[in-house]
Image (cartoon, coloured by chain):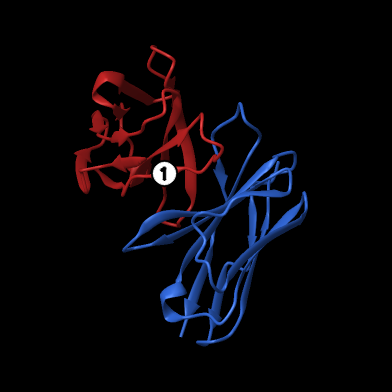
Chain colours: A blue, B red
Amino acid sequence: NAGVIQTPRHKVTGKGQEATLWCEPISGHSAVFWYRQTIVQGLEFLTYFRNQAPIDDSGMPKERFSAQMPNQSHSTLKIQSTQPQDSAVYLCASSLGPNYAEQFFGPGTRLTVL
Amino acid sequence: AQKVTQTQTSISVVEKTTVTMDCVYETRDSSYFLFWYKQTASGEIVFLIRQDSYKKENATVGHYSLNFQKPKSSIGLIITATQIEDSAVYFCAMREASSGSWQLIFGSGTQLTVMP
């Protein structure tokens, strides 16, 4: 089975531009998670979906960040008006269900905002 | 509030020896899951091993094992017979079972270097 797929692997945007990051979870996994990794903050939770429904977005910056899961095979994280402080590796993970607590991570998208 | 703390920033060992990495956690939940992940030099994050809070037996997978000390809120990772390719950053993580959120709370990581 393929693991979690994330595209693009690298993205460079100018300040103020929009960035859309894509994630394809492992087939059959019911939960999809987004995390962000920086040197300063480490690994931070952003948001997650269960059976495509948004469940917890407590880690999402309230402005400019949004996430969707239009179908069971992909999720998107959109950042509007990107700022240099948004530069990070954005990681998507999926898990099989409530009794399978471990999450499996994709390779991440490295976002650089100039 | 949930918190996971890894105080060891980096550890160096000689290959084929045993290494232990420390992790302590804070939670008000009576039921929770603890995990160790490894991040390789390429950035890939790999799930290694899991411990459920209600289980008294320490989990073991291959040459990874856990030292779960619930009264001390501690979950140490033990790697036996280390290999060069075990060099990576190791993250401890926790998920509370009772809360509605399945988010993982991560520690800051421990860089392991295995030398020949």
Q: Look at the picture and state if A41 lies above or below A26.
A: below
User: Residue A28, percent across and down?
Assistant: 74, 38
Q: Look at the picture and state if B109 lies above or below B92.
A: below
Q: Nearer the viewer, residue B32 or B20?
A: B32
Say if residue A107 shows up in the picture. Answer: no
User: Residue B11, percent across and down?
Assistant: 20, 43
Q: Look at the picture and state if A94 lies above or below A38.
A: above
Q: Is residue B55 left or right of residue B21?
A: right
Provide the residue designation for mark 1. Answer: B105
Q: Look at the picture and state if B30 lies above or below A39.
A: above
Check the residue under mark 1 and report the chain it is in.
B
Q: What type is the residue that disc 1 sits on?
A: Ile
Say if residue A39 shows up in the picture. Answer: yes
Q: Is residue A41 left or right of residue A82?
A: left
- The kind of secondary structure element at disc 1 is strand
**Residue B71 found in image quarter:** top left
Give the farthest residue toward the top: B56
User: Residue A34, percent across and down?
Assistant: 56, 55
* Quadrant into which the N terminus of chain A falls: top right
Which residue corresponds to the image point at 43% horizontal and 80% vertical from the top-left?
A84
User: Label 1 crowding class (10 Å Cα cut-off): few <14, some 14-19, many 20+?
Assistant: many
Q: Is residue B17 left or right of residue B48?
A: left
Q: How many marks?
A: 1
User: Residue A41, percent across and down?
Assistant: 34, 60
Which residue corresponds to the image point at 56% horizontal and 74% vertical from the top-left?
A64
Which residue corresponds to the image point at 69% horizontal and 46% vertical from the top-left?
A2
